[in-house]
Amino acid sequence: MRSGATLGLALGILAIVGVVVGTREIGILFSALPAVLGFGGYLFQRFTGEFGFRSAISPDGVRLRHGLLETRSQTIPPGRVQAVRLQQGPFWRGPDWWRVDVNVAGYGVSGDGTDTKSVLLPVGTRDEALAALWLVLPDLGTPEPRALLDEGLSGRDAGEHFVVSPRRARLLDPVSWRRNGFSVTDRALLLRSGRVFRSLVVVPHERTQSLGLEQGPLQRRLDVATFAVHSTPGPIAPKAGHLDAHDAARLLDTQSVRAREARAHQGPELWMRRDEVPLDDARPEEATA
């Protein structure tokens, strides 16, 4: 289960108990009980839906199988993957666990709100998460993919690969400004964000739908802007917050050119062919969670 939802439930229960103890009004507990049960039901539904998660390569794409009370199977065609997100909450920092979600053209959001159709890996180690990424995006267009991804997953400040928010952005985002940034390779755009909840989004150039800049009044005053990639419906909204306004404008222009050229030169989907193994010389055929 996602640590953010679990943390929210725990804090909510503690707050309710604190109010009941402080006011000695037991009626508050019964008033809040439906909300607690509803949120707990959501977590239970997510747990049972993602239980026993398995992924494997098939000729049609990445085949997924999961479920505790009801087993579900689906196949994700890599050619329809528009964006991939690797995410880590604070409770997962110690064991270095990650969750991998995808935006898939034609899927959108599940009717029950659990988004299991957009999950590529509910929880796994860093190596397992990178293997899941490799299943749908085997070539990031860089000679050092592991160094790039490690910097994107756990790095902060400007490094060898990432351009980050300027120091003045700390007034708008005092927690995450040193993490927020972007990197560009020959094949993909990578957007890094979040310090408490770390996130790395990878968007293949040819899957870029449209681009935009967002700038509120405080951002204009500080000469920063938020860069956004408009993707298909799904759990991922690719953004890089509070970039230097000139960096954001330049990224908008250059990424538009890259996306147009990538779509023009896009060949047939030969995703089963693995000429190179980009991550630690490992060739995973199946991942489990």
Image (cartoon, rainbow, N blue to C red):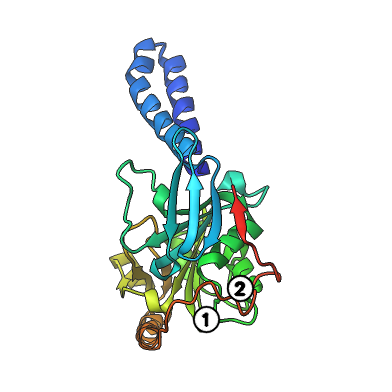
- Helix, strand, or loop for circle 1? loop
Q: How many labels does the image show?
A: 2
| Residue 36: image tag | none
Amino acid at circle 1: Thr
Q: Residue at x 61, y 80 (%)?
A: 275
Mark 1 or mark 2, earlier in chain: 2
Residue 221 visible (yes or no): yes
Of all residues, the one furthest to the front in this rendering is 59
Of all residues, the one furthest to the right in this rendering is 281
Query: Which x, y percent locates residue 53?
Result: 54, 46
| Closer to us: 270 or 116 | 270
Query: Which x, y percent locates residue 8?
Result: 46, 37
Q: How far apart are marks 1 and 2 (CA)?
A: 10 Å
| Closer to us: 2 or 214 | 2
Residue 239 visible (yes or no): no
**Badge 2 density bin: few <14, some 14–19, many ≥20, Cα 10 Å:** many
Query: Which x, y percent locates residue 43?
Result: 45, 35
**Badge 1 density bin: few <14, some 14–19, many ≥20, Cα 10 Å:** some
- Kindly identify which residue carries mark 2: 148
| Closer to us: 33 or 145 | 145
Query: Residue 251 sits in which quadrant?
Result: bottom left
Q: Is 12 located above or below residue 173 in the figure?
A: above
- Asked whether disc 1 touches disc 2, contact meaning CB atoms under 8 Å apart, the reply is yes
Q: Which residue is drawn at 46% across and 32% down?
A: 69
Amino acid at circle 2: Leu
Query: Which x, y percent locates residue 19?
Result: 42, 21
Q: Is 108 located above or below residue 51 in the figure?
A: below
- Helix, strand, or loop for circle 2? helix
| Residue 185: image tag | 1
